Amino acid sequence: MTIKQMSITLRIAAIYNLLWGAWVVLFPNHFFELVGMELPIHPVIWQGMGMVIGVYGLGYWWASQNPLTHWPIVAVGFLGKIFGPIGFLVNYVSGAVPFEFIYTLFTNDFIWWIPFFLILKKANEEKKIKWV
């Protein structure tokens, strides 16, 4: 993956996250209506999640300026994209969330695993990542 491809990937991620975050903040019930889930009792919690996702978008935009230097932003995003599905699985198995919630994982998490991993791999190869 070239630096230009990394930058483009992070800009796409930024735009996606900003749009998704705005959608969830402005229309907190819409996702639940689309997938036929029960509406949240406290939509402000879901809106808070939208705000956090939107802030990630700002981070990805800034990281796109120099992906290898700003690898920590990519790393934080990558960890969120790993832990989010793990959290879903734990909560689904325990019965806390319905299966339909998995739809959020495809565009919020799974599609970013490979490109974010490749950016972090390149940063490591270029000795940008300091482990200590």
Image (spheres, grey):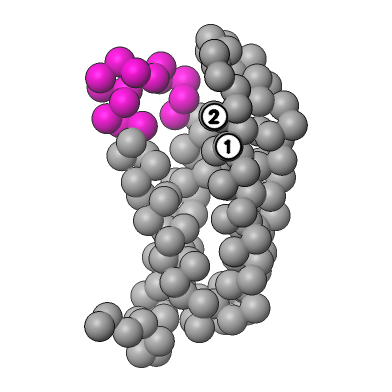
Front position in the image: 27 or 121: 27
Q: Quadrant of residue 90?
A: top left
Q: Quadrant of the C terminus?
A: bottom left
23 left or right of 83 in image: right
Compared with 92, 126 (above or below) is below
Q: Is 31 included in the stretch rendered in magenta?
A: no
Q: Residue at x 62, y 33 (%)?
A: 47
Residue behind mark 1: 48
Front position in the image: 6 or 20: 20
Q: Quadrant of residue 94?
A: top left
Contact between labelled residues 1 and 2, with CB atoms less than 8 Å apart: yes
Separation of marks 2 and 1 at Cα, in angstroms = 5 Å
Q: How far across and down, in percent of the image, does residue 19 sit?
A: 71, 45
Q: How far across and down, in percent of the image, does residue 52 sit?
A: 56, 47
Residue behind mark 2: 45
User: Is residue 78 something that shows in the picture?
Assistant: yes
Q: Main secondary structure of the magenta part?
A: helix
Q: Is 98 included in the stretch rendered in magenta?
A: yes
Identify the amino acid type marked 2. Ile
Compared with 111, 124 (above or below) is below
Neighbor class of circle 1 (other Cα within 10 Å; few <14, some 14-19, many 20+) is: some
Identify the amino acid type marked 1. Gly
Q: Helix, strand or loop at disc 1?
A: helix
The region drawn magenta spans 88-102
User: Is residue 35 something that shows in the picture?
Assistant: no
80 left or right of 62 in image: left
